[in-house]
Amino acid sequence: MFVTTAGRTNQQMIEKAMETAEVLNIPYIARKKKSILLLQKETNSECIVVGKERLELFHKEAQHPFFFHPNSAMFRIKRLKNGEHDPFADAAQLNNGMTFLDCTLGLASDSIVASYLVGDEGRVTGTEGQKYLAFIVQEGLRTWKTEVPEMNKAMASIQVIHSQALEYLKSLPDESYDCVYFDPMFDESILESDGIKALGYIAMHEDLNKEMIDEAYRVTKYRVLLKDHYKSKRFEKYGFNVFRRKTAKFHFGILEK
């Protein structure tokens, strides 16, 4: 992995690229009018490109780069502001000042909604085992701006932890988060957009198992929340109480403390 700049660059972007390379402890390579494809062939490596408005991760095998985007969170928060319902919000039962741990952060769509729900007094944390994805998502959450001030604040306040979910759960004391969340559907649903297909090539996938559920149950104060396909056997396997939704391809399951 190395860092470079977009084709049309400036001194500010060069400095940002060099800073990113230093933070991630990977090389910075000057663009020098070379294409990304040529630089990747010369280095036989993936790369992060610093552009004017965003970071992009180019995988050698992907046709499109990965970049952060708040995805569905924007229109979901607008709905919540209008007093409408959101299935995740209904299942998570988050209020102002609560704490939320997302063990399958991805592009953080649900974490952004959670952060909006818990407000300034609350705390939202997400885990990501792949350090480059963790960095890009963290930067995206910090710098992406929308026309909704509450959403900008919600994104900026999310803490991204570079760690495998189980490892992080084991490091936490009992009842340290009000709600612990798993979304194993993220692996398949996230690949539907061209702009983020590269994520499938580089993301680390951690299978949900009994040890993770047990650790989540120990760590949560109120509930463990699972979002999964409506045909999933995980709900029954791990004892979740399922909230079934007609015509929806996924349901939410809850383990109450």
Image (cartoon, rainbow, N blue to C red):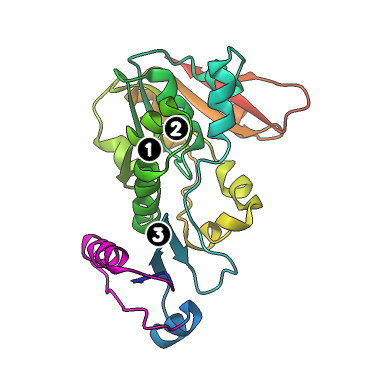
> In the rendered view, would you say 42 is above or below 166?
below
- Tell me, yes or no, if residue 238 can be seen here: no
* Among numbered discs 1 and 2, the one appearing first in the sequence: 2
Q: Where is mark 2, residue-wise?
A: 111
> In the rendered view, would you say 193 is above or below 145?
below
Q: Position of residue 71 (x, y in %)?
A: 56, 41
Mark 1 closeness class: few <14, some 14–19, many ≥20 residues within 10 Å: many
The amino acid on which the numbered mark 3 sits, given as a three-letter code, is Lys
- Tell me, yes or no, if residue 47 can be seen here: yes
* Among numbered discs 3 and 2, the one appearing first in the sequence: 3
Secondary structure, mark 1, is: strand
Q: Is residue 154 magenta?
A: no
Q: Position of residue 104 (x, y in %)?
A: 46, 40
Q: Quadrant of the N terminus?
A: bottom left
- Numbered disc in front, either 3 or 2: 3
What is the residue that sits farthest to the right in this orientation? 247
At horizontal 23% and vertical 62% (from top left) the residue drawn is 19
Secondary structure, mark 2, is: helix
The amino acid on which the numbered mark 1 sits, given as a three-letter code, is Gly
Task: Pick the residue in front: 132 or 208.
Answer: 132
State which region is magenta.
7-34
Query: Residue 126 got which mark?
Result: 1
Q: Are marks 1 and 2 in contact (CB under 8 Å)?
A: yes
Q: Where is mark 3, residue-wise?
A: 52
Q: Disc 1 versus disc 2: distance between alpha carbons?
A: 7 Å
Q: Position of residue 166 (x, y in %)?
A: 36, 41
* Among numbered discs 1 and 3, the one appearing first in the sequence: 3
Mark 2 closeness class: few <14, some 14–19, many ≥20 residues within 10 Å: many
At horizontal 69% and vertical 20% (from top left) the residue drawn is 244
